Amino acid sequence: LASVEDSRLAKYDWRAVAKLARYVDAFTSPAPYVIDNINDATHNEMEKRGFVVPNGVNDVFARAERIRDSTDTLRFLSCGRLDPEKRVDIIIKAFAALPEADVELYILGSGTEEANLKRLAHDLHPKNRIEFLGHYEDHERVANEFANSDVFVFSSYRFDTQGMVLGEAASAGAAIIYCDDRLTIGVDSHNSLLVNNSATAFTAAMRRLMADRDLLQRMQHASKLLIPQLTADEMCTKFLHVYRSVLPK
């Protein structure tokens, strides 16, 4: 993937996006790395026109209440499309390497890889510690799954622009394990463990939180502290700043 990021084609794509940006007074992206790449492609010509404006998280996630006792089975959650680019197989393989313990993995979502992932989970975990929930249309049901999980695991790498599920997980008070350093919304050094993109690294992070429940609780609390940065109101405030920056004084 790194070679693709640095390829001539990728650089051409960024230059093409930068050409479009030259025709506007201001442009936004929910991800800092997008702004940075456009600036690099224009030798910082567009530096003052680009603004990072993350998409706001539905407040249903912050309102969701945990109904599971904190002493219950430690629950890891994955949520997203079950397609190859989301790399959910990495999460299943990582979980499979954990010792037999009071832990479980819930997988929320559907997609083209669903059947293959279920076979993988069955082959690696015949004891059924992995549960596939399917696709939920109702935001409240999704939020409840986040609130009732202990750790959100996200294995997508160099694909997502913002990774909305990271903000949703933080708003619901889950600790986070993820691997893409370009994703910065909903994660920081206090509520998340940033690991490399291998199953082995995810396993190590899972083991760490299984062994250190005090750290887990501190990370969950730190997630809740990020809520003010993640709301739709905060997104609107940032957009107003962008609009005002280009209006005549």
Image: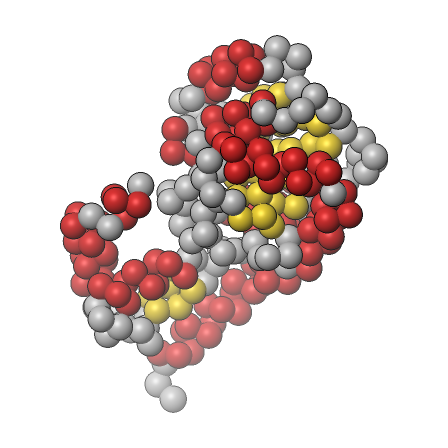
| Residue beneath the point at 20% across and 48% down | 7
Q: How is the image coloured?
A: secondary structure
Give 228 or 88, whichever is nearer the viewer.
88
| Image quadrant assignment for residue 25 | bottom left
Q: Position of residue 165 (x, y in %)?
A: 54, 44
Is 20 placed above or below 122 here?
below
Q: Is residue 38 visible?
A: yes
How many numbered dots are placed on residues in this image?
0
In the depicted view, which residue is nearer to us: 73 or 50?
A: 73
Residue appearing at x 59%, y 37% in the figure:
204
Residue at x 64%, y 62% (from the top left corner): 228
| Image side of residue 133 versus residue 225, left or right | left
Q: Quadrant of the N terminus?
A: top left
Q: Is residue 58 left or right of residue 48?
A: right
Q: Residue furthest bottom?
A: 249
Please tell me which residue lies in front, 44 or 193: 193
| Residue 241 point in image, percent of width and height | 46, 74
Does residue 61 lie above or below 198 as drawn?
Answer: below
Name the residue: 45% across, 63% down: 53
Residue 126 image point, x, y percent: 61, 10
Which residue is at the front of the view, 114 or 125? Answer: 125
Q: Position of residue 67 (x, y in %)?
A: 80, 36
Position of residue 213 in the picture relative to residue 90 (left or right)? right
Asked whether, in this view, residue 148 is left or right of residue 14, the answer is right
Depicted 182 relative to depicted 206: above or below? below
**Figure quadrant of the C terminus:** bottom left
